[in-house]
Image (cartoon, grey):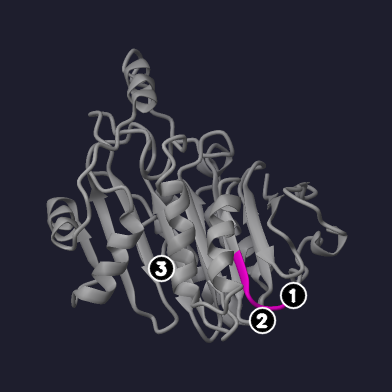
Amino acid sequence: MTTRRKFIQLGALASVASVIKTWGKPAVKVSKPVVISTWNFGAGANVEAWKILSADGRALDAVEAGARVPEGDPKESSVGLGGLPDRDGRVTLDSCIMDEFANCGAVACLEHIVHPVSVARKVMEKTPHVFLVGEGALKFALDQGFKKEKLLTKESEKAWKEWLKTAKYKPVANIENHDTIGIVAIDTKQNLSGACTTSGMAYKMHGRVGDSPIIGAALFVDNEIGAATSTGVGEEVIRIVGSHLVVELMRQGNSPQQACELAVARIVKNQPQKSKEIQVGFLALNKNGEYGAYALQKGFTYAVYSNEIPNTIFEAKSFY
């Protein structure tokens, strides 16, 4: 069953009718540059990304700058500073970034660093590796000049202590309890890049890593085709290598909207019962500037910023 996409307008917008499309049809094509990102806080990320894109800057710089916004916001409990801790009370962060040349970098289970997306970029640019984790990632970050900081805020610590009273873990991700920002962009030179960053599911087992730092799962960029990102319960995205799947579906001729729908359908096919109880959403942008989004459940929102669409939040259609 499908539902009508609702939108939340952030500023003056002459008309949004043209961007609300029906099931299975190509998403709107807009002039480049374009930046799209997951959830309501994606709007704030888009503002910073747009400053770079609108000045003919590189998409890679834009997605990093955008991702840093929720990372540095102590009021956001699912990304960076202020992120809810694992069940041991430790805030561990995961992030990845990928550019138009298929260069990529990632960090996981990183503690004490506010901006893991920038550490991931350093991994990409300063090492022969793609992925650093745990203590090794922290040492690398400190060696690169990042400042060691306390990430557990008073609010997050209070929430964790309240959770300890029952210690019940149910991995639900939706607009009230999401876990990731994924952001992808295309610049005026028609180059694509993307980033994804998170503090992971609240009260997870220490050491748990979801899809967010995994290239091909939460993020994939192919500069010939497009880029995709994901949000929600990462284990299910990993099982289908979700974002890579979305890009490959676009390579086969599907629109970004169709590709996101097909990827969600794959999860439903593989996990028919579980898929009714969890949230996973995909967001995609192709080389032509077309974008699309789709989720398992209602409530997955995403933000779009282009010359035609002044930073607007939409709710994606859903399978259920």
| Residue at the image point whose x is 19% and y is 58% from the top | 141
Task: Name the mark nearer the viewer: 3 or 1.
Answer: 1
Element at label 3: loop
Mark 2 highlights which residue? Answer: 288
Vertically, is 151 above or below 310? above
Under mark 3, the amino acid is Gly
Q: What is the magenta range?
A: 30-35
| 233 in magenta | no
Mark 1 highlights which residue? Answer: 29
Marks 3 and 2 sit apart, C-alpha to C-alpha, by 21 Å
Is residue 244 shown to the viewer in this render? no
Mark 3 highlights which residue? Answer: 216
Say few, some or many: other residues with alpha carbon within 10 Å of mark 3 (under 14 / 14 to 19 / 20 or more). many
Q: Position of residue 288 (x, y in %)?
A: 66, 81
Which quarter of the figure has residue 179?
A: top left
Marks 1 and 2: in contact by CB < 8 Å?
A: yes
